[in-house]
Structures are given as structure tokens and as C-alpha cells.
Image: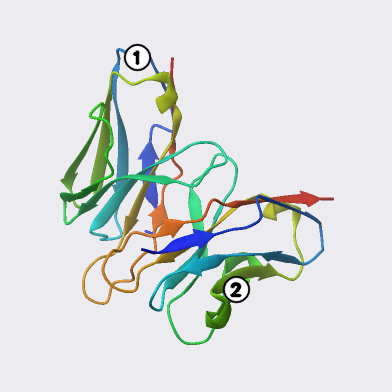
Amino acid sequence: AQSVTQPDIHITVSEGASLELRCNYSYGATPYLFWYVQSPGQGLQLLLKYFSGDTLVQGIKGFEAEFKRSQSSFNLRKPSVHWSDAAEYFCAVGASGGSYIPTFGRGTSLIVHP
Amino acid sequence: DTEVTQTPKHLVMGMTNKKSLKCEQHMGHRAMYWYKQKAKKPPELMFVYSYEKLSINESVPSRFSPECPNSSLLNLHLHALQPEDSALYLCASSPLGRGATTGELFFGEGSRLTVL
């Protein structure tokens, strides 16, 4: 079974600073990896996804993530954070064969200071 | 159309009431999901419908009753709920079948349920 670890419950950054949110996964084969964002009181929105190919994936809102198989990681990055990026971020792993249900990490809450 | 629409956005009900949450999508997705989400927690899977048939029930109490009338609609019928059932209920959909991407979910904005 797959699992996801997001080690940071909260991350605080200043507006304009760079951001990296950590995600580690456990899965025996090549996983499908996702980052979702949830603004307060809203549903989840897909930021980006990795299935295969180039390990650096670009997403919406200026986010990118890099798949590192050797480290079982899929960290999310943004070079310059905007106040509107304050939200809850969920990393998720989906099985590349069999179950199509993604497993979510516990989430990381991003706080942006002006 | 890439939206999943949920109604109502907010619902307050007593423990003896019967109400329903509704979800609709027109993306041709053949998998639809109900999730429950408590504050500051990840979504918890409740039910999955694939090709309009219930494929997964994550041991959800019978006071929650899902229904999938057709490939675009998903309902969640609520009866005799408890205050601890208060949460954000999220509907999601995803494609299925050959060539479909697994695990990529499209979420609605949710229905905020308060049980008094």
C-alpha cells in the first residue's frame, strides 16, 4: 500500500520569499504523484502532477515540483510567494496500477507574512 | 466544462432531520467520490462509485446513504446524523478506463454540514 508523509504541519514565509514544501512517499513501483491546494472553505484544486518522464514538473500558479526517486520525494517549490498562496497543501500518491484512489498526506498549512 | 458542482454550500440540520447533498459533473468522468473533511485534516474517503456502481464503502455508518442516479450525478442522503458528523463534505470525480489517468481528482467546493 502507498503512503505519504508531509513532515511539516505549518510553514511560515514572508511574501516574496521562496518556498519549498516537503513530501515523501512510500510505494513499491513508480507512483503517480500530485500536489493539491485548498484555500479556506474551498475544495481541493490540483496544482500539478507527475506520471512519468521529466522529473521536474510545472504546475499552475507558478508552482513546480521535482520527483526524486532516490529520495522518494516530491517536493513543491515556488520562487516567490504571494499572500494569496496562503492555504493548505496536500501531497498525494496514486498507484500506477490497480487502485485508482489517491492517498493524501496530512497537509501543510502555509502562512504568508506581509 | 471542468467543474464539479455541489449543493447546497451550507446545510444546518437537526439530528432527526433527513437531508441530501448533491453533486454534478459533466466531464464524462465515470468515477465519483464522497469525502469527509474535518478542519485542518486531509479528506477521508467515504464512498466511490465507478460506472455508477458502488465500488468502495469505507465502513461508513448507515446514516450516510450514497446514490448515483446516472453518470453525472451523485447524492449523499443524510438521516439521524450526530453532531460529530459536522464537517465539509467533498465530492470529486475522475476519469476511468483505458488511457485514463489514475488518482487525478476534480473536486467540488464542498458542502459545509452542521448537525445540531
Q: Which mark is residue B15?
A: 1
Figure check: B110 above or below B115: below
Figure check: B101 above or below A86: below
Q: Label 2 is placed on what type of residue?
A: Ala
Q: Which mark is residue A65?
A: 2
Asked if one can make out residue A56 in the rendered structure from this viewpoint, the answer is: no
What residue sits 73% from the left and 65% below the top? Answer: A19
Residue A36, percent from left and from top? 52, 58
Residue B73, percent from left and from top? 24, 45
* Mark 2 → mark 1, Cα distance in angstroms: 45 Å
Figure check: B25 above or below B116: below
What residue sits 47% from the left and 87% below the top? Answer: A53
The residue at the far bottom in this view is A53
Asked if one can make out residue B17 in the rendered structure from this viewpoint, the answer is: yes
Residue B15: quarter of image: top left
What residue sits 29% from the left and 18% below the top? Answer: B80
Q: In terms of depth relative to the viewer, which is nearer, A53 or A6?
A: A6
Tell me the SS state at disc 1: loop
Q: Is residue B79 left or right of residue A8?
A: left
Q: In terms of depth relative to the viewer, which is nearer, A11 or B17?
A: A11
Residue A38, percent from left and from top? 56, 50
| Quarter of the figure that contains the N terminus of chain B | bottom left
Q: Label 1 is placed on what type of residue?
A: Met
Q: Which mark is residue A53?
A: none
Q: Is residue B26 left or right of residue A39?
A: left
Mark 2 closeness class: few <14, some 14–19, many ≥20 residues within 10 Å: many
| Quarter of the figure that contains the C terminus of chain B | top left
Residue A84, percent from left and from top? 70, 52
